[in-house]
Image: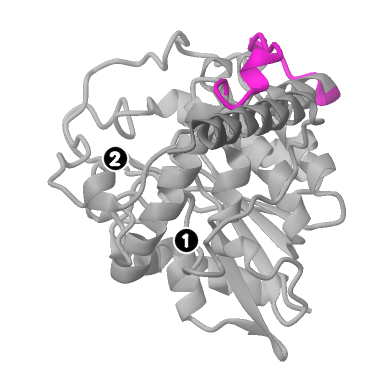
Amino acid sequence: MDFRFIRNVIIKALFLFVIFNLVLMYLPRDTEKEQISLYNTVVPGRERFPFGEAPQQAYNFSLYDLDAMFSAHRVAARPGNQDEIRIFLVGDSSVWGTLLKPEETLSGILNEMDLACGDQPLQFYNLGYPTISLTKDLMIMQRAAQYKPDLIIWLTTLEAFPLDKQLASPLALNNPQRIQPLVEQYQLPLEVTMLEEDIWSRSLWGQRRTYADWIRLQLYGFLWAATGIDQYYGPYEPAAWDLEADENYYQFTPPKMPNEELLWQAFPAALDLTGDVPLWLVNEPIMISAGENSEIRYNYFYPRWAYDQYRQELIQRSEHLDIPLIDAWDWIAPLEFTNSAIHLTPVGERILAEGLADEMEASFCP
């Protein structure tokens, strides 16, 4: 055996490894880059963002690299496609589709309807992500702009507004470099903790979790393509019907909910982020219980006084900002909710989709 040859190979490999790390450490960061991905090429793009805690059953898992998430999504397949009208649905787990198959989600049903404006088909893209936070939604909207939407429909609810909820979303918490510019530009009343970043954290070793997640995401793509499964559909406990006799909403007590504790600044920020792209708001459906103490609370989330004040303020602010608002809060019967006061059954999703389709036919198409 030629030990000099082996020694030279090892030395060259180490040299290349050091050079690669140096390039990686000093390469300028680009937070709007399109990542290399097997999705939309070797395997189909996902119908919704990667999310999940049971990867072996769901062929899916949660990660916090927004670029990798978008690159795995079918929205990245034909960015700016002029042959369709591209409509982005943004929101929480109700939009993403907890306990729903991809074709049962709001976007899946709307696409099944084959809606069109004249000769141009409407194509709906599911950009919802579980966890409820307006700031998380703003971050996603900003990143989605490069895919050239023709309309953004933002589905939200009161639970997304309290300031304490904004950075509770792990996706927002793990992307301070994206959130901080939004906070500064739009003077959002949030305190973002920036992670200490040194040269070593930008090395191959420092980014090992990011690269490992990227590899896992690509590998699960083959299983997703073969099965169409991207979520674990296990047993669940139905949303609470009988409620506590509690009038408080978090730290807020009746009769007045302070607006300064809610992130109403997100609406003018979203208008600026979307620019010339139309923005619609949807006050998403909530379960309206008729069980014990339902005269005090609509559901587990909301005492009646707090939610009624929120709706009134929502209507007034959307009118002031000239943002079209679809107030769908009471569209769905209470038995068409699953494990949460905002998660719908397939029947409930279809009712919501049909209502939105009617609104679009009346107001969106020229």
Q: Give the Cα distance between marks 1 and 2.
A: 25 Å
Is 315 placed above or below 186 here? below
Q: What amino acid is labelled 1 in the image? A: Arg
Q: How many tags in the picture?
A: 2
Can residue 354 be seen here? The reply is no
Give the labeled residue for mark 2: 340
From the viewer's side, name the closer residue of 112 and 200. 200
Identify which residue is drawn at 47% across, 62% down.
47
Tell me: 240 left or right of 250: left
Q: Residue furthest front?
A: 1
Q: Is residue 244 part of the magenta span, yes or no?
A: no
Name which of mark 1 and mark 2 comes first in the sequence.
1
The residue carrying pointer 1 sits among few (fewer than 14), some (14 to 19) or many (20 or more) residues within 10 Å by Cα, namely many
State which region is magenta: 185-206
Is 167 placed left or right of 20 in the picture?
left
Query: Mark 2 Cα within 10 Å, few/some/many (few <14, many 20+)?
Result: some
Relative to 34, residue 196 above or below? above
- Say which residue appears at 41% left-offset and 17% top-offset: 249
Residue kind at label 2, given as amino acid type:
Ser
The reply, left or right, for residue 280 in relation to residue 111 is right
Image coords of residue 186 (percent x, y):
82, 25
Point 74% across, 27% down: residue: 265
Q: Is residue 191 magenta?
A: yes
**Rendering coords of residue 269 (x, y %):** 78, 34
Relative to 83, 122 lies left or right = left
Q: Which numbered dot is residue 46?
A: 1
